[in-house]
């Protein structure tokens, strides 16, 4: 157990690291973050910054030497950094949660989907495009439409091309010099869901009920907690999340996303960290996903169950960032609305600047006609 006063480290220094700091520092922990960014969102919440590239083994090792436990705020970490962390942990006993191997699974779509299969979790049909031979075989067996995705470094809809016909996919393939992709057959879902789950060192699991999510331009726009799915669907969603955690021996907090159509559920992806769709937990009247991240990292005592109140969440992107506007001022007059800004100085369209949580009655109508 890492007691208050211990030194905690986070790979990355953005908004998730910032919100981790807002939980950990009041507990009495010292938090340091490692990233190339100066004056980061996490630093604005009290974190000490270690600034260098993720490929800088010497600087990363120095950072690791000055912490007692390490966690992550994003998954797209270069392999050289994961190997450095893994070797350092084996050599010194540094606590790292989740494990570098779990991060590797999440950052590689092929590994991720095959891990889902091993855990007995249904997914869309998918095919690897890792060689020239793969291109030929995929064209002959894929049902269209489909989506070609980069195997790594994809998030918020980046690195994706939708192909309606075999001819379209063939044309895209002809422009791929070094194939490192995956093709997924398109699934026409009617709703999207996610589960926020925490698994402790001893195998204990805590989770929130599934939430319902709405995306706009591939970026999460709204989350409604709970999602109020039928009991049979809720049970399956939570059980699938548990299966994944146990299959890959995950310790920490993660978010897992699903597509739903009728009684059919397909898993989309998981993130080895707190998830955007879990931000509702900050104002749900109970433990938050960031507190769970802290508790799983430090192996602290935690409740037996989570009884969270209904909350809806809306992301604030650069184009929505309007402090002092009539809408914002009117919203702040209502005590059920809670504003969370990330301390980012550069404002641009599509960039996540913060989020609103609403914890009052009728959460479904809290953000109607905001766009």
Image (cartoon, rainbow, N blue to C red):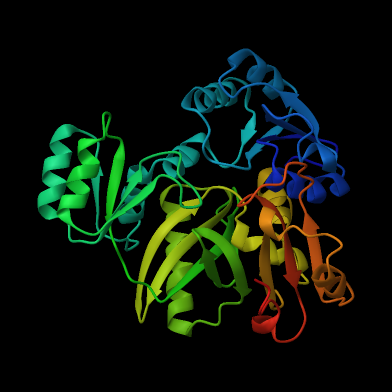
Residue at the outermost top position: 58
> Residue 101, percent across and down?
46, 37
Residue drawn at point x = 73 percent, y = 33 percent: 33
Instruction: Report which quarter residue 97 is drawn in.
Output: top right
Quadrant (top left/top right/bottom left/bottom right) for the N terminus: top right
- Count how many numbered circles sit on residues in the image: 0
Residue that lies at the very extreme toward the right in this rendered image = 333
Which quadrant is the C terminus positioned in? Answer: bottom right
Residue placed at 83% from the left, 73% from the top?
Answer: 331
The answer to which quarter of the image holds residue 88 is top right
Q: Measuring from the top left, give residue 27's x and y in whole percent.
A: 85, 48
Residue 317, can we see it?
no
Question: Where is 169 relative to 64, above or below?
Answer: below
Q: Nearer the viewer, residue 214 or 329?
A: 329
On the question of residue 226 being in view, the answer is yes
User: What residue is shown at x 87% (from left), y 43% (from top)?
Assistant: 28
Measured along the vertical axis of the image, is residue 362 above or below residue 336? below
Left or right of 316 on screen, residue 21: right
């Amino acid at each position: 157990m890492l007691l208050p006063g211990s030194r905690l480290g986070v790979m990355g220094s953005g908004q998730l690291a910032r919100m981790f700091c807002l939980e950990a520092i009041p507990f009495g922990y010292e938090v340091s973050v490692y990233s190339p960014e100066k004056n980061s969102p996490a630093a604005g919440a009290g974190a000490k910054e270690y600034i260098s590239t993720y490929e800088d083994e010497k600087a990363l090792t120095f950072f690791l030497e000055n912490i007692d436990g390490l966690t992550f705020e994003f998954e797209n970490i270069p392999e050289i950094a994961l190997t450095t962390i893994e070797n350092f942990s084996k050599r010194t006993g540094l606590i790292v949660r989740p494990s570098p191997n779990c991060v590797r699974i999440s950052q590689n779509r092929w590994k991720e989907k095959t891990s889902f299969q091993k855990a007995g979790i249904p997914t869309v049909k998918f095919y690897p495009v890792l060689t020239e031979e793969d291109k030929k075989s995929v064209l002959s067996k894929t049902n269209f439409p489909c989506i070609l995705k980069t195997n790594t470094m994809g998030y918020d809809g980046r690195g994706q091309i939708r192909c309606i016909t075999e001819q379209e996919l063939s044309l895209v393939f002809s422009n791929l010099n070094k194939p490192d992709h995956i093709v997924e057959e398109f699934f026409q879902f009617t709703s999207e869901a996610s589960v926020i789950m925490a698994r402790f060192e001893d195998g204990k699991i805590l989770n929130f009920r599934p939430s319902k999510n709405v995306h706009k331009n591939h970026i999460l726009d709204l989350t409604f907690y709970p999602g109020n799915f039928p009991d049979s669907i809720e049970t399956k969603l939570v059980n699938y999340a548990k299966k994944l955690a146990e299959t890959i021996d995950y310790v920490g907090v993660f978010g897992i996303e699903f597509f739903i159509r009728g009684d059919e559920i397909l898993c989309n992806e998981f993130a080895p960290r707190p998830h955007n769709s879990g931000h509702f937990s900050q104002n749900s009247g109970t433990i938050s996903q960031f507190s769970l991240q802290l508790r799983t990292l430090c192996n602290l005592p935690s409740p037996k169950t989570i009884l969270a109140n209904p909350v809806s969440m809306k992301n604030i992107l650069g184009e929505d960032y309007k402090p002092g506007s009539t809408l914002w001022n009117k919203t702040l007059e209502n005590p059920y609305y809670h504003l969370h800004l990330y301390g980012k100085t550069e404002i641009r369209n599509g960039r996540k600047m913060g989020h609103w949580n609403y914890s009052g009655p009728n959460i479904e109508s809290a953000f109607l006609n905001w766009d």
